[in-house]
């Protein structure tokens, strides 16, 4: 989608410092972090939200989660723990309508989050 901020980041049209990159996704630091470590993992393909995924997206969704775990291990915060969040649609807190996974770490998290 030509007007999607995250599509532009994924394609390299908008520069970003990537912390992870592969054929299916890219990851970068959130510009408005909600934790000391706040990384966004986005698929290269545009999907508006988790609500718009289908059975054919199962492998991609699994890949996004395993990428999150890999990033956590490679950056040394897996053992202490981290949180993975997917906000879905407006009431779920989604503000950029390109599916993305929030990887948060560097502090203790509580549940329920709010």
Image (cartoon, rainbow, N blue to C red):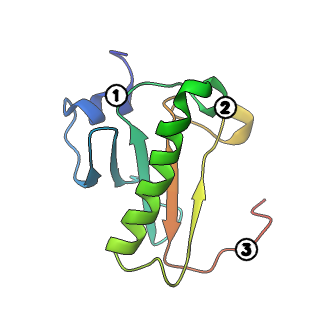
Which of the labelled discs sits on residue 89, or is there none? 2
Q: Report crowding for label 1: few under 14, some 14 to 19, many 20 or more residues within 10 A (C-alpha).
A: many
- CA distance for labels 1 and 2: 18 Å
> What secondary structure is marked by label 2?
loop
The residue lying at 22 percent from left, 52 percent from top is: 17
The residue lying at 47 percent from left, 77 percent from top is: 78
> What secondary structure is marked by label 3?
loop
Dots 3 and 1: beta carbons under 8 Å? no
The residue lying at 53 percent from left, 62 percent from top is: 34
Above or below: residue 108 compared with residue 113: below
3 or 1: tag closer to the N-terminus:
1
Residue 32 placed where, x, y %? 45, 54
- Residue located beneath label 1 in the image: 7
1 or 2: tag closer to the N-terminus:
1
Residue 53 visible here: no
- CA distance for labels 3 and 2: 23 Å
Residue 82 placed where, x, y %? 55, 71
- CA distance for labels 3 and 1: 32 Å
Query: Where is residue 93, by image quadrant?
Result: top right
Above or below: residue 52 compared with residue 34: above
Which is more toward the observer, 53 or 48? 53
**Residue at the extreme bottom:** 80
Residue 5 visible here: yes
3 or 2: tag closer to the N-terminus:
2
- Residue located beneath label 3 in the image: 110
Above or below: residue 96 compared with residue 112: above
> What secondary structure is marked by label 1?
helix
Which is more toward the observer, 78 or 99? 78
Q: Report crowding for label 2: few under 14, some 14 to 19, many 20 or more residues within 10 A (C-alpha).
A: some
Query: Where is residue 43, by image quadrant?
Result: top left
Q: Which quadrant, please, contains the N terminus?
A: top left
The residue lying at 36 percent from left, 17 percent from top is: 3
């Amino acid at each position: 989608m030509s007007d999607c901020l995250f599509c532009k980041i994924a394609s390299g049209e908008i520069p970003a410092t990537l912390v992870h990159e592969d054929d299916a996704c890219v990851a970068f630091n959130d510009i408005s972090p909600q934790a000391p470590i706040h990384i966004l993992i986005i698929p290269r393909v545009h999907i508006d939200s988790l609500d718009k995924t289908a059975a054919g997206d199962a492998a991609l969704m699994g890949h996004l989660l395993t990428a999150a775990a890999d990033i956590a291990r490679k950056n040394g915060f897996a053992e202490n723990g981290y949180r993975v969040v997917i906000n879905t649609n407006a009431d779920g807190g989604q503000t950029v309508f390109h599916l993305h996974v929030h990887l948060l770490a560097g502090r203790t998290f509580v549940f329920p989050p709010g």
